[in-house]
Amino acid sequence: MSPETRTLKECFARLDADPAGATGYFYGRLFAREPRLRALFPPAMGPQHDRFFQALTRIVWSQDNPAELASHLGRLGRDHRRYGVLREHYPAVETALLATLRTFAADVWTPEAEAAWTAAYRSAAATMIAAAERDAAAHPPWWVAGITGHDRRAHDLAVLTLRPERALPFLPGQYVSVQTARWPRVWRPYSIANAPRPDGTLRLHVRARPAGWVSGALVRHCAPGDTVLLGPATGTMTLAPGSTRGLLLIGGGTGLAPMKALAEHAAASGRDVRLLVGARTEDGLYDLPALRRLESACARLRVTPVLSGAPAPPGGLHGRIPDILPGYLDGVPDWQDHDAYVAGPVPLVRRTVTALQRQGLSLTRIHHDLLAAEN
Ligand SMILES: NC(=O)C1=CN([C@@H]2O[C@H](COP(=O)(O)OP(=O)(O)OC[C@H]3O[C@@H](n4cnc5c(N)ncnc54)[C@H](O)[C@@H]3O)[C@@H](O)[C@H]2O)C=CC1
């Protein structure tokens, strides 16, 4: 570890001892100096505080891994476009960040520490700005999309069809951030539930969360004819280019969405696809008729519904996916040659990844994307 990185980590440890205090202080300083920046952020700042602290943590801990740092900062820079962040906003952030460090890391704050943080911040900001400007040459910061379909599948669940006004490029398995007119500046990520289509439409599977602003608005307060804003497609849970390996796709609840996109794409090219779709009870299998239709159209796609809180459905299994996996895999020829993809509630993803590893599948063949929970 370089002496500069050691210094950065030493100061950061002071912030890490009181993340809520440090982020509160940081945003207080930022908005006191530049009140107009407040308009870029949502009314409730709690989730933003967490995101800021997570981003800072990752930047500090990737200092000695330039490739990981550059890719993280590039994503962050591109992502900030949809908030309306511009090159000229970065110096105010630098001032507020250094003031926060000076206060919270006072006992280790030296001229060397200030020089190391200033250099690290400026280099990070330059990478973010360059990525944002490159992206601006190719894409808008957000896409306006009309809701063309709103299919309420349960009291708290809807499948939405969106038609962006301009083509929104994406790969199966990726997700987009969504902003509704009801909650300006509040963005939430949702996996795209279809492979790219000639008409450019996207499908989202949305379950309204008890305290979920965006999910509640999308399920209960949106209808065909309304518009939403979409950020660029992102996420790395995509298919390896050129691979023809079979796929083992596992989706729990609305975690089905990215699996359906991957299944549609891969099954159309004739790959062997095994799709396990988990729910607690029968009404959680909200997309089963469509999956059965897809299965009949694709000779090498097999769909198996799995219920954890009700008896096995027709053609399906009973239990929790991580528990039934070993028995299920016994019946899949050459399953070790498959790539596995998993999405759904965090405990399901974690336990399924562990179960797959126990069965001998290498981590490099297991893909997941612990997407920030839909809210
Ligand atoms: N890319 C991703 O990873 C995506 C993740 N999601 C997440 O998926 C979740 C879906 O929620 P719901 O539709 O309400 O699903 P849910 O809570 O009804 O659960 C669906 C499935 O997960 C299983 N499950 C739940 N807890 C488990 C545990 N501790 N161990 C093993 N299995 C468990 C259930 O048995 C059921 O099969 C949300 O948290 C959402 O954020 C949604 C879309 C994409």
Image (cartoon, rainbow, N blue to C red):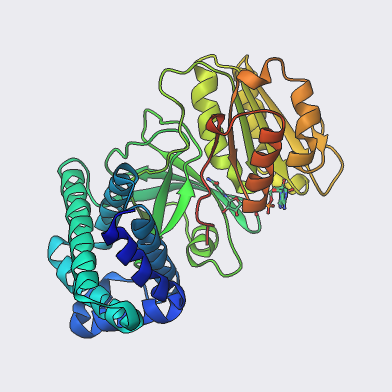
| Residue depicted at 73% across the width and 19% down the height | 332
Q: Nearer the viewer, residue 102 or 366?
A: 102
Seen in the image, is 302 located left or right of residue 245? right
Quadrant position of residue 166:
top left
Note whether residue 183 is visible.
Answer: no
In the foreground, 340 or 305: 340
State the image coordinates of residue 296 (x, y, percent, origin top left).
65, 20
Give residue 106's position: percent from left, percent from top.
Answer: 31, 83
Horizontally, residue 13 falls left or right of residue 77, namely: right
Compared to residue 87, the image places residue 133 above or below, namely above
Q: Is residue 72 above or below residue 14?
A: above
Q: Is residue 241 above or below residue 354?
A: above
Q: Position of residue 99 (x, y in %)?
A: 25, 80
Pick whichever, 113 or 84, lies toward us.
113
Question: Which residue is pictured at 49% across the width and 67% down the height?
Answer: 213
- Is residue 40 something that shows in the picture? yes
**Total residue callouts:** 0
- Place residue 226 in its image quadrant: bottom left
Residue found farthest to the right: 311
In the picture as drawn, the residue positioned furthest to the left comes out as 88
The image quadrant that residue 103 belongs to is bottom left
Residue at the image position 40 percent from the left and 48 percent from the top: 176
Q: Looking at the picture, tell me which residue is in the foreground, 226 or 234.
A: 234
Q: Position of residue 289 (x, y in %)?
A: 67, 34
